[in-house]
Image (tube, grey):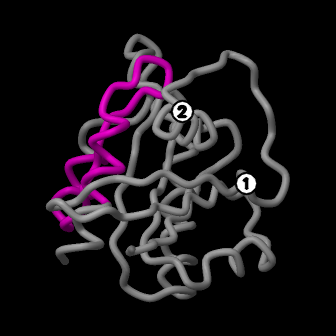
Amino acid sequence: MTQKKICMLGSFAVGKTSLVARFVQGLFSEDYLTTIGVKIDKKRVEVEGEPVDLLLWDLNGQDRFLNVSMSYLRGSAAYLLVADGTRKPTLDVALSLHEKARATVGEVPFLLLLNKADLADDWEIEEDAVAALQAQGWTVLRTSAKTGTKVDDAFGMLARQLVDP
């Protein structure tokens, strides 16, 4: 059995916990609960016929980079950066967290999730910014924890990268 640790990184209230709940339990709640420290969930997926246990570390949202939280990254096989598409500053936080994560765990697979795609009328992140990241080789997905849009795709894509790099 293969086990892989994946960390969820992003600003507060971008939907990290909701994305994990949607993926692991198929649930979404309108109630906002702040993650304190770290919450760990597990989901078994199948990649190329082989079972893989994903250990999902949902780290507290950060706009200030606390060393203790970065220490949670140690041993991570990958991470998901999450930004709220309706709040442009959360993309800047995700970009800064990416640099901190690279300094902590090195070059491991990651994806950028622009969450809250169901709120398209309130979208603030410009396509130019997304295109610039994609031009650098980043995989960027518009997700919605509320509707489930691209949530399974994101975790599945990352799992495949971990098993077959």
In terms of depth relative to the viewer, which is nearer, 136 or 113?
113
- CA separation in Å, label 1 and label 2: 14 Å
Is 59 displayed left or right of 151 in the figure?
right
Q: How crowded is mark 2: few (under 14 residues within 10 Å), some or many (20 or more)?
A: few
Task: Write the start and end of the magenta stretch as one range.
Answer: 129-158
Residue 149: x %, y % from top left: 33, 26
Residue 35 at x, y percent in the picture: 78, 46
The quarter of the rendered structure image containing the C terminus is bottom left
> From this viewpoint, which residue is outermost toward the top?
121
Q: Position of residue 91 (x, y in %)?
A: 49, 49
Q: Between tags 1 and 2, which lies in front?
A: 2
Q: Look at the numbered disc 2 and give the secondary structure of its residue.
A: helix
Horizontal arrangement in the rendering, residue 56 relative to residue 4 (left or right): right
Q: Residue 97, can we see it?
A: yes
Please tell me which residue lies in front, 144 or 134: 144
In primary-sequence order, the first of circles 1 and 2 is 2
- Mark 1 belongs to which amino acid? Lys
Task: Tell me where residue 153 sits by quadrant.
Answer: top left
Q: Position of residue 156 (x, y in %)?
A: 28, 51
Query: Which of the 4 quarters of the picture holds residue 4?
Result: bottom left
Secondary structure under the numbered disc 1 in the rendered image: strand
Q: Which residue is drawn at 38% across and 75% down?
A: 2
Residue position marked by numbered label 1 in the rendering: 39
Which amino acid is tagged 2? Answer: Gln
Residue at the image position 39 percent from the left and 74 percent from the top:
1
* Contact flag, marks 1 and 2 (Cβ < 8 Å): no
The mark found on residue 25 in the picture is: 2
User: For the point 23% across and 63% down, which residue is it?
Assistant: 160
- Residue 50's image quarter? bottom left
Residue 62 seen in the current view: no
Residue at screen point 51% across, 86% down? 105
